[in-house]
Image (cartoon, grey):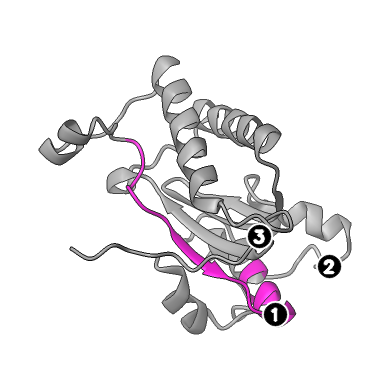
Amino acid sequence: MPNYRRFTVPGATVFFTVVTQERRRFLTDPLARRCLRVAFQVVRARHPFEIPAIVILPDHLHALWVLPPGDSSYAMRWRRIKGEFTERFLSEGGQEGRRSASRELRKERGVWQRRFWEHTILDEGDFERHCDYIHYNPVKHGLVDCPCDWAYSSFQRWVRRQAYPSGWGCSSHDPPINLDSLNQTAME
């Protein structure tokens, strides 16, 4: 199998999709949210980055990160976030999924999919499209009728900044974004 090489740009803004193993639906449970918050805090304290937009759904999350100038080590950050989360989550009573022989051999836990998907943001329009995609995702998945109703998202922060009206993206209207173009890039 050839080595997979990620496209890295120091100081880039990057969109991510990170998925639980077997799409197990636990990320919005109180324990998982607490462990995820702590994992982000621990890793950001040692390896800073900004999170302009994020949404946490039951079985995956999407995030936009801005890396510091000269730094392109997002894979290391995700490895540490996943590791910190997994250790804390399992020690506090969280359940892992089935561990395959391959996972057993590699000493991997049954919490996260091995990899994640990333897309380096190309320009301001690309940033806006991905920010919209992140905030519309709970509506897309039928979890709420309006992005403002989903508690596990940066949407309300953006509303307070007046970047979105509070009723943006309500499902009673047509989607406010072209989901087809971003679905191809978000690998959901």
Residue 123 disc label = 1
Corner quadrant of residue 79: top left
Above or below, comparing residue 175 to residue 157 in the picture: below
Residue receiving disc 3? 147
Q: Marks 2/1: CA distance?
A: 17 Å
Q: Nearer the viewer, mark 2 or mark 3?
A: 2
Magenta extent: 111-131
Residue 23, image x, y percentages: 33, 48
> Answer yes or no: do the residues labelled 2 and 3 have beta carbons within 8 Å?
no
Residue receiving disc 2? 163
Give the mark, 2 or 3, whose residue is nearer the N terminus. Answer: 3
Give the mark, 3 or 1, whose residue is nearer the N terminus. Answer: 1
In the rendered structure, which amino acid carries the disc numbered 2? Ala
In the rendered structure, which amino acid carries the disc numbered 1? Asp
Give the mark, 2 or 1, whose residue is nearer the N terminus. Answer: 1
Of all residues, the one furthest to the left in this rendering is 101
